Image: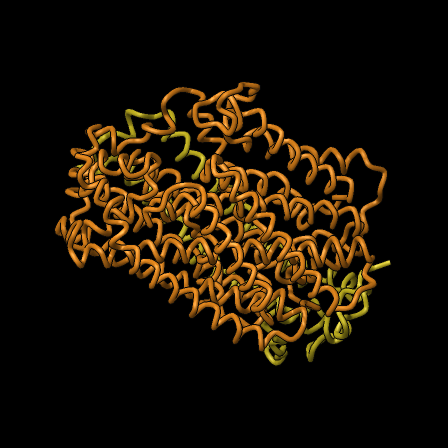
Chain colours: A yellow, B orange
Amino acid sequence: MEPPVTPGRQPDPAVYSEVESSEEFRELRRSYRMFAFPVAVAFLAWYLLYVLLSSFADGLMSTKAVGHLNVAFFLGIAQFVTTFLIAWWYARFAGARLDPRAERLKAVVENGGRPAAVPGPAAAPTTATDATPEETV
Amino acid sequence: MSAQALTLAAGASDHRPLIITLFSVFVAVTLGITVWAGRRTKDATDFYAGGRSFTGLQNGLAISGDYMSAASFLGIAGSIALAGYDGFLYSIGFLVAWLVALLLVAEPLRNSGRFTMADMLAYRLRQRPVRTAAGTSTIVVSIFYLLAQMVGAGALVSLLLGVHGDGPKRLIVALVGVVMVLYVTIGGMKGTTWVQIVKAVLLILGTLLITILVMDKFHWNPSSLLGAAADRSGKGSAFLEPGLKYGVDTTSKINFISLALALVFGTAGLPHVLVRFYTVPTAKVARKSVNWAIGIIGAFYLMTLALGFGAAALVGHDAIVASDKAGNTAAPLLAENVGGGAGTTGGAILLAVISAVAFATILAVVAGLTLASSASFAHDLWANVIRRGKVTEKNEVATAKIAAVVIGAVAIVLGMYATKLNAAALVALAFAVAASANLPTILFSLYWKRFTTAGAVWSIYGGLVSSVVLVIFSPVVSGADDALFSGSDFHWFPLTNPGIVSIPLAFALGWLGTMLSREQPDAAKYQELEVRALTGAGAH
């Protein structure tokens, strides 16, 4: 019924459901969503605000700020700056808060659901220091 | 006033040997790379995903190469040169859109899919209907985008090489088509990725050089550049404010909001962008590559400001319009100007370099599109729908190559005869279709537990059909001076971009289809998808 997905290295489906209900996975999902969803809504709102101001707030946008540089120009540059900042911020957040957990859970799944060298998938992140999941490339 | 414009037309024949030489060197070098990459392409993972062996920087450059089409290079510089601030306004949507891809799409797609967008969508839903829908929308989006590039290539070549008449234009379109098919069939994803990298580096260097020369003329003072541009535009300070292009009346304002929505939601639904996330080993590298792309694309759009306003200030409105009404030759004209002016060696060299970079841009983008659409045909429609998975890897890759030849032939024929289509409108349409048909299903499928096959099928076909139908009955096709059928008028939809209607409609249909179907979502499969998407367990 299923398509020919991958040869080898595919864990038992039951393992996924077990990991999905583990506390550590729920924490990973929560911290990812608590970051990504509000930030996505915020930048979309900020971009739409800029589009609406450009369309309907002629007076504000044409106010000269420095020399020939007006408010519209600075707001446009601000869109670039916020895009760069969010990209950098997310990379930093993900590197510190998501990647270590994700790698540990991946090792658990690939170990057939058994914790990789730590007692229980619900173990606190700090106790899992000796779990060295390998980067499977 | 038209003296300078005439130099481009007349001088084009002097520059022709140099432009053709540079372009031939590019084609020869990239074909060499393609053959080299082809020898290293052994299995389907190599052909579709470049062996998943690219680094974050390499893939970031390749993403930028795929994304910075001739429409953005020549089109945005030209729009800024003619419409001032509104050209800049247009470019911002193209950049901000990458945050959707970064935060919500790139990593889970990399972790849960294999070769195509449909791999991820079909994960927890019923294979055949979802793959059929996603494969269809992938091919439709790619054909629109491909057609835009082909039409642009024909128009551009006649301007830059000074060739006129349908014969030479069609010859160029055919040449572009043949080279792109060679890249894809011989080099697969490895070859195509390296072509993108070479092109992105050339484009960035060319743009950087012109930017430096322009800024130097204005003593690195943006205010005096803008002042000079406003003075020479004939529109004064209005040139530096929003409104010249998109603010004419309420319809054009709503039109712009519609376009902005299509850009911001469309990028993360473009098939040729999505498949690039499969060319790296892990989700973490996919994230790095998007971050590189954001940096490169952002820097590029900032430089188009210098190009556009520089062209307005140095070349002047009249000379730009005399050369091309849409402003597409503003950047090459500016290159000639800052190189020393018409008739000088420096001017001739820079004009030739920038023109060759523009050709390279078109070639690389069409190759990426052909690869993405032929991969989706072979992997989704042929292997999984028609043959129900009973097909060898070798047969699937061979099918993809045949599909690339067929899609290439279709693009060549359409490109030869559809020269009246407006390239910019076609690109905007491709974004609108991607935003309506693809993105809602991608997001629902990743983040909504209850989502079902019916929801996906309703959303994809609903988004696809509504956006295409609205365009058919819009001023793009009839009832306007620059419409496809300018002689007749059967339009009833006032906007040139359907996004503001079709995107919310596609989201609503995804929800409605799910709520109305009695199908039970596969809870275990969703758990599996969530774990795989977030952790990378079992990733290909």
| Quadrant of res B76 | top left
Compared across the picture, whether B355 is left or right of B341 comes to right
Q: Is residue B507 visible in the rendered structure shown here?
A: no
Quarter of the image with the C terminus of chain A in it: bottom right
Residue A55, by quadrant, is top left
Image point (52%, 38%), residue name: B418
Image x and y of residue B311, in percent: 23, 43
Q: Report the number of numbered marks.
A: 0
* Front position in the image: B235 or B268: B235
- Above or below, B269 relative to B511: below
For the question of whether residue B99 can be seen, the reply is: yes
Give coordinates of residue B441: x percent, y percent: 67, 44
Q: Is residue A43 above or below residue B45?
A: above
On the image, the x and y values in percent for residue B387 come to: 82, 57
Question: Where in the figure is residue B147, as x and y percent of width and height?
Answer: 53, 44
Which residue is at 19% across, 41% downward?
B4
- Residue A124 versus residue A34: which sits nearer the camera? A34
State the quadrant of the N terminus of chain A. bottom right
Write the residue at 45% across / 58% down. Answer: B65
Q: Tell whether B222 sits left or right of B278.
A: left
Q: Looking at the image, is B454 positioned above or below residue B199?
A: above
Nearest to the observer: residue B232 or residue B280: B232
Using residue B31 as the reference point, say whether residue B403 is left or right of it: right
Taking depth in this image into account, of B484 and B372 the one nearest to the observer is: B484
Say whether residue B306 is left or right of residue B479: left
Residue drawn at x 23%, y 30% is A63
